[in-house]
Image (spheres, helix red, strand yellow):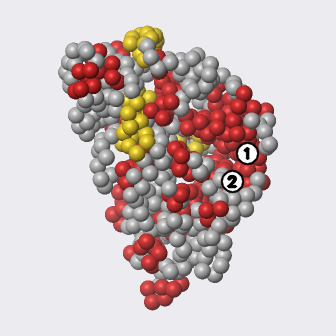
Amino acid sequence: MKKINLILLLVISLTSISCKKYLDVVPAEFATEEDVFANINLSEQALARLYNALPNDLGSDISAYTDETYHQWFDNSGGIDAYKYNLGSWSNTDNPIGNWAGKYQDIRRANIFIANIDAVPVPLNRADYYGIWKPRYKAEARFLRAQFYFELFKRYGAVPLVTEKTVVDPANIENTMLFRNSVDEVVSFIVSECDAIANELPLTHESAQIGRITKGAALALKSRTLLYAASPLFNGNALYAGIRNSDGKLLFSSTYNKEKWKRAADAARQVIDLGIYSLYNPFPANPVQNYAAQFYTRDYTETILPRIMANSTTYDGNHLPNGPPFKGSAKLTPLQEFVDAFEMSNGFPINEAGSGYQINGTWNGQLWDGLKFSSATGLSNMYKNRDPRFYATVFFQYSLWRFDANKRGVKLAWWGGGNGQTDGWATGKAGTSPWGYNVRKFLSPEYDRNAGTGTARRNFPIFRLAEIYLNYAEAMNEYLDQPDASVYDYVNRVRQRVSMPVLPVIGADNSKTGMRNRIQNERRIELAFEGSRFWDVRRWMIAKRVDNTAVNVLNARPSAAELTATGLNITTEAAGLAVFYKPVVIQNRIFTDKHYLMPIPQNEMDKDPNLVQNFGW
């Protein structure tokens, strides 16, 4: 069988296609469209271009647009995307992650591919092969189009559905004027496409084809779509009750429908019941590694759809701590609010009586350094006995990374003589780590940046089984009057992978509201830095609370007066540590009701008077 390596297809699509503008925007595409669909190899390249538009949040800044991290390279510089979002200074002419036009270009390319692929000629000696693969290509393109619509749906809610190949006639531009379809219609289209193609797609692919769409991927997209549709943002939200097309069509239903949660739960169970995925679990005796390793290896046990990535150390260089011996650029600083979300290892939230959480004092113990357990000393009690995922997700003061090579722990505190001896400089110079934490998740211990040896082999998980388990638990918890055994079961499967105690742990866990809080926090921890939190806080409609407040980091940039007030020699590490473990406000963030959905870009409104704007814009 001919093997089409998807990685090569993506490379080809980025080079030859970008040069020849295959299926590019009108009108240039019509000079080449006939050629593209007269040649099966060029058609395959066109499909690869569609694949290249799949989401990839590895290394993106989206975690800094919400209550996960602070983008510290630029230190409140105007014009930076995260800065604009967090200060509410973006608009319908300046939305860094709106991508309305880009997604509709992708959809148009998909429509053209779907309309033409059946008729593409193939060599006679390859007829049997393409008899299998051409229907799959078409199903893959339908999935990709549905995924593109999901990207628009989660940003804008109700959007126009364009599902056929259309020709733009500059002399008859009115034919291109589109009304927005309702949220229910958009969701129905995405779900119906997933259902229609599921049985056209294989359950698995041979190794050379991994990264292609499978039945599981189609059902996972269905699961995610229905979960969003059942959530408060789209299910009974009174904010959008008055948004109608000019013909009176209602775009958002303000009537709550409990059955939407049941549909979401059933969709998640469809993925689970395939029985072909399992939680990544090769190191059950080491819960830190059991979680961490799936994000720097090419795992295909839990990952339902990976975004295939070439070997690269760019992410590692951007996120490792600064300074010798790590030599990273420390792009993102996890917020103290995010750190505080990690439970204690006994399953208690840190602010719950009986948790055992302590702020003062230090401890010594064994920490996983990415390769082995090593001895660490002087660790703050803030970081003692936490959820194992914490140690796999965040670098903190004196945490360890490749200890045998680096010879010391991470030092993020600063003191008067600390430059060159710490990984966080009080100058706040771009590329340093002046706020007390760094991102660790997705980093590969195979790569030694100091020595310049090793590499990083990882993909980005677009869908993975842990999310599906949490989708099911959330949907069933919302559907039922109080959580049943299945709700606990699927949350606990995720927790047990990292040796966290099974729920219920505290009394509140026995109630619908208590489990809602647990499930939301479980998603926050399990799916950290995977691009989920930004959308989750919107669909739950909690962003006005968590993204409209002061956010904190540690006091890793103390004043000379603070250091002097310790009574210690300000050029010593002890002085820096004496003032380090104090939360300090790094930013006062702004989020209002209108920010729950993005505004349709003003230039699109100007071109199409049939479009009505979202609430508040």
Amino acid type of disc 1?
Glu
Residue 65 is left or right of residue 240, and the answer is: left
Q: Position of residue 614 (x, y in %)?
A: 54, 67
From the top left corner, tell me how far across and down residue 82 is, in percent: 38, 49
Q: Sequence order check: which comes first, mark 1 or mark 2? A: 2
Residue drawn at (31%, 46%) of the image: 76
For label 1, the SS is helix
- In space, the residues marked 1 and 2 are separated at their CA atoms by 9 Å
468 horizontally vs 476: left or right? left
Is disc 2 placed on a helix, strand or loop? helix
What residue sits right under mark 1 in the picture? 478
Please tell me which residue is depicted at 52% across the width and 71% down the height of the picture: 613
Label 2 near label 1: C-beta < 8 Å?
A: yes
Per the image, the residue denoted by label 2 is: 230
The percent position of residue 199, horizontal first and vertical second, equals 71, 53
Q: Nearer the viewer, residue 349 or 226?
A: 349
Give the vertical position of 303 relative to 156 (above or below): above
- For label 1, count other residues whose C-alpha is less than 10 Å away and answer few (under 14), some (14-19) or many (20+): many
